[in-house]
Image (cartoon, helix red, strand yellow):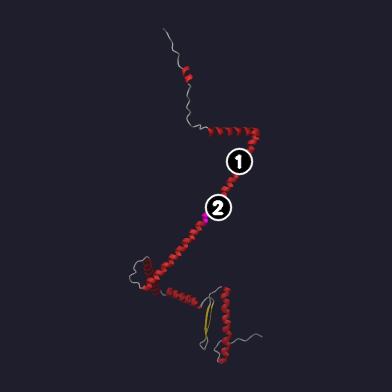
Amino acid sequence: MGRGKIAIRRIDNSTSRQVTFSKRRSGLLKKAKELSILCDAEVGLIVFSSTEKLYDFASTSMKSVLERYTKLNEENYHLNNPTSEIKFWQREASSLGQQLLYLQQCHRQLLGEELSGLSINDLQNLENQLEKSLKGVRIKKEQTLSEEIKELHMKGNLIQQENIELRKKKHVVSQENAVLQKKVYGPESISAVNGVNHITHGVHKEYDVNSPINLELSQSQSQNRKKPDVNLG
C-alpha cells in the first residue's frame, strides 16, 4: 500500500515539525542542485528556519543571483510604470554623464593638465600609474620588435635556401647543356670550340682591342711612295 496523503498545514508538535523541516530542507537543496546541473540554470535558494537559522544554496554565487533578480524586477517594474521608467533612465543618463566627466578629468591629468588641485598622494598615485603604463608600453614595444626580428630572420633563411636551390638548378642546367653540346657537335668539335675560346680570351687579355693603333711607315717606304721628279729640260 502507498503512503497516505499528508495534510499540508502547520505541524503543531515542535519535534515533528523540526524533523520534517530537516528532511524536506535537505531534499529541497538536493533538488535545487540537480536542477542547476541538469538544466544549466542559475539557481539561488534561501531558507530561514523557525529558529532564525539560515540555509542557502547558489549555483554560481548568491550575490550574482540576487543582483540579477533585483535588476530583472526593476526592469519589469519600469516597463509596467512609464513614469518610473523615465526617472530610471534619467538617473542612468546622469550617472553616465558623471562617469564621462570623471574619465575626461583623469585623461587630462594623465596628459599633465589640471594638476593644481591634487595632493601629494594624488600626484604620487598619478606618477605610479604613468610609470606602470610606460612600462607596459615598453614591454609591448620590445615584444613587437622581437617578433619583427624573428620574422626577418625567417625571411632571410628562406631567401638563402632559395639561392641555394637556384645554384643547384643552374649547375644541373649547365651539365645538361654540356651533354647536349656533346650530342650535337661531338667531343672533338667541343674541344676545338673550347680551344678557340681559350685563344680568343688570351688575345683579349694580352692586347687591348679598344686602344688606338698607330701605324707609321718606314723611311724607305715613305721615299718610295714619293712621286719621281720629271726633268723636262
From the top left corner, tell me how far across and down residue 123 is, in percent. 37, 71
The picture places residue 223, in percent across and down from the top left corner, at 46, 18
In this view of the protein, can residue 7 be seen by the observer?
A: no
Let me know if residue 182 appears in the view. Answer: yes
Q: Where does residue 92 sit, x and y in percent of width and height?
A: 40, 72
Where 78 falls versus 12 (above or below)?
above
The amino acid on which the numbered mark 2 sits, given as a three-letter code, is Asn
Q: Is residue 23 above or below residue 97?
A: below
- Residue range highlighted in magenta: 150-159
Label 2 neighbour load within 10 Å: few <14, some 14-19, many 20+: few
Position of residue 151 relative to residue 170, above or below, is: below
Mark 1 or mark 2: which comes first in sequence? 2
Q: Can you say which quadrant of the picture contains the N terminus?
A: bottom right
> Which residue is outermost to the left?
116
As helix, strand or loop, the secondary structure at mark 2 comes to helix
- Report helix, strand or loop for mark 1: helix
In three-dimensional space, the C-alpha distance between marks 1 and 2, rounded to whole angstroms, equals 26 Å
- Residues packed near mark 1 inside 10 Å, few (<14), some (14 to 19) or many (20 plus): few
Q: Describe residue 131's horizontal placement relative to residue 10 as left or right.
A: left
Residue at x 61%, y 33% (from the top left corner)? 195
Residue 174 part of the magenta-drawn span: no
Q: How many marks?
A: 2
Which numbered marker is on residue 174?
1
Relative height, residue 140 to residue 47 (above, below): above
Q: Residue 157's mark?
A: 2
**Viewer-proximal residue among 229 and 152:** 229
Q: Quadrant of the C terminus?
A: top left
